[in-house]
Image: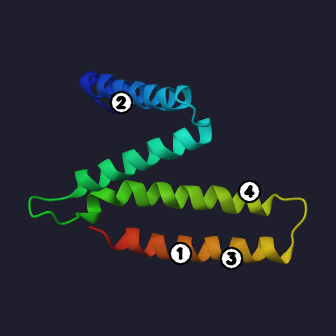
Amino acid sequence: MYSNDVTQIRSGLTQYIGALTATMVSQGKTARNAKHEVAAILGEEMISLSEDENGEVDVFVLKPLLRATLNTLSMRMNDLSELSVQTEAVAEKHKEYAEASRIIHSLVESIK
């Protein structure tokens, strides 16, 4: 799928992300908060990466991020469906996730 160079660079990126997270934890952050901050940093970098020469965001570049969001929503809906107690609040949250998923899916399909 990828050349050896890309695989090695990706491995280095993964190691960098782990090291950044570990550093934040060693500085007193909880693992959850450290991961949150690392994700925020990566998100900011993805936005920068998506900018064209005029500073406009090319949403095609962000399409993988939107697909990841769809996958996350799908996993969350599955988690809610598998709860042993199905309350009205759970059903409403599932409905909200389904609507967000529908909108994002439509957006992803429109990006060329």
Residue 73, quarter of the rendered image: bottom right
Q: Amino acid at mark 2?
A: Leu
Name the N-terminal-most of marks 3 and 2.
Answer: 2
Residue tagged 2: 13
Q: Residue 109 location, x and y as percent? A: 38, 70
Q: Could you tell me which residue is drawn at 55 percent across and 70 percent down?
A: 101
Residue tagged 3: 95
Q: Is residue 25 above or below residue 94?
A: above
Label 3 crowding class (10 Å Cα cut-off): few <14, some 14-19, many 20+?
few
Name the N-terminal-most of marks 1 and 2.
Answer: 2
Depth check: 37 or 92 in front?
37
Colour pattern: rainbow
Label 1 crowding class (10 Å Cα cut-off): few <14, some 14-19, many 20+?
few
Q: Could you tell me which residue is drawn at 53 percent across and 75 percent down?
A: 102
Q: Residue 64 location, x and y as percent? A: 38, 54
Question: In the image, which disc is placed on residue 102?
Answer: 1
* Quadrant the C terminus occupies: bottom left
Horizontal side, residue 58 vs residue 80: left or right:
left
**Disc 1 to disc 2, how far (Cα)?**
32 Å
